[in-house]
Amino acid sequence: MRNTHQEEDCSLKTKSDRAAADVYHLFHVGDTEKLFNEAFREHATTSTNCEGDLVMDIEHEQQWGLNWTERLKCTNCGYLSKHHELYKEVEVAAAKKGRRSSTANTGLQIGLSKCPMGCDSFRVLCMSADIPPPSSSGIQKPANRVCDNIKSQNVKDMRARRVEMREINKYRGTNLNNMLIVQLTQLSLKCMKQGRWMFVRKPFSIQGTYQPVIENS
């Protein structure tokens, strides 16, 4: 005997979820395929005579930055799949406590560090494209970690450059105790009307700075 009351409740909730599903999400393709294939096989085994559709359970989805944890549910029999993380985590050499960063959240912050755009501007772009934006805290935490790593790598790189310059000057016969004279120019990055980024020397409307250093000896 069919559970008509349960099916009607499930159908009503599904209709309300479908209105909330009219957005765009960022999913990892391989993990999404795994979610659907497992749910299809499990639903076909447990509910052999069900003719309902499997849809995203919008009410119980979880967002983490750009990433999503989803499960599927049946519009007819109330079947629920397991939650799947539809993203990849960053591989780290040493195990740390807590959740590992995802490749999408980390890659986003690396990209933002290379262009004159902040986290708030990125959230505006997401909302304009009908993509649920990450929360301010959810996007700021990976930004802090990435910026710390970039700073650490820059310090290591500059240290290696100094050692290399010292070796070059040794082969050139330069006295290593002499002061090294360099020339530094600070340029400001400003957006032009044509949509191009150009380096200017004016201090107003600055979006970023660029400081080339040249040996002048």
Image (cartoon, rainbow, N blue to C red):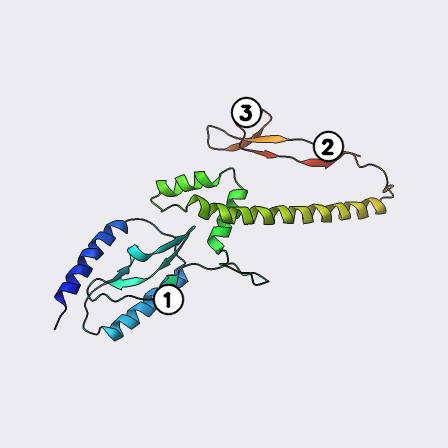
Q: Secondary structure at mark 2?
A: strand
Task: Find disc 3 in the rendering and name its residue.
Answer: 204
Tag of residue 183? 2
Task: Work out which quarter of the rendered image holds the C terminus and state it.
Answer: top right
Task: Find disc 1 in the rendering and name its residue.
Answer: 34
From the viewer's side, name the closer residue of 94 and 153: 94
Cα distance, mark 2 to mark 1? 56 Å
Amino acid residing under circle 3: Phe
Q: Position of residue 137 (x, y in %)?
A: 45, 46
Location of residue 69 by image quarter: bottom left
Mark 2 and mark 1 lie on one chain; the one further toward the N terminus is 1
Residue at image coords 19%, 70%: 50
From the viewer's side, name the closer residue of 146 and 209: 146
Tag of residue 21? none
Residue 3 position (above or below residue 13): below
Q: Position of residue 136 (x, y in %)?
A: 44, 43
Amino acid residing under circle 1: Lys
Q: How many C-alpha atoms fall within 10 Å of the one at disc 3: few (<14), some, or many (≥20)? A: few
Mark 1 and mark 3 lie on one chain; the one further toward the N terminus is 1
Q: Secondary structure at mark 3?
A: loop
Left or right relative to 205: residue 59: left
Q: Position of residue 34 (x, y in %)?
A: 37, 66
Q: Position of residue 179 (x, y in %)?
A: 82, 36
Amino acid residing under circle 2: Gln
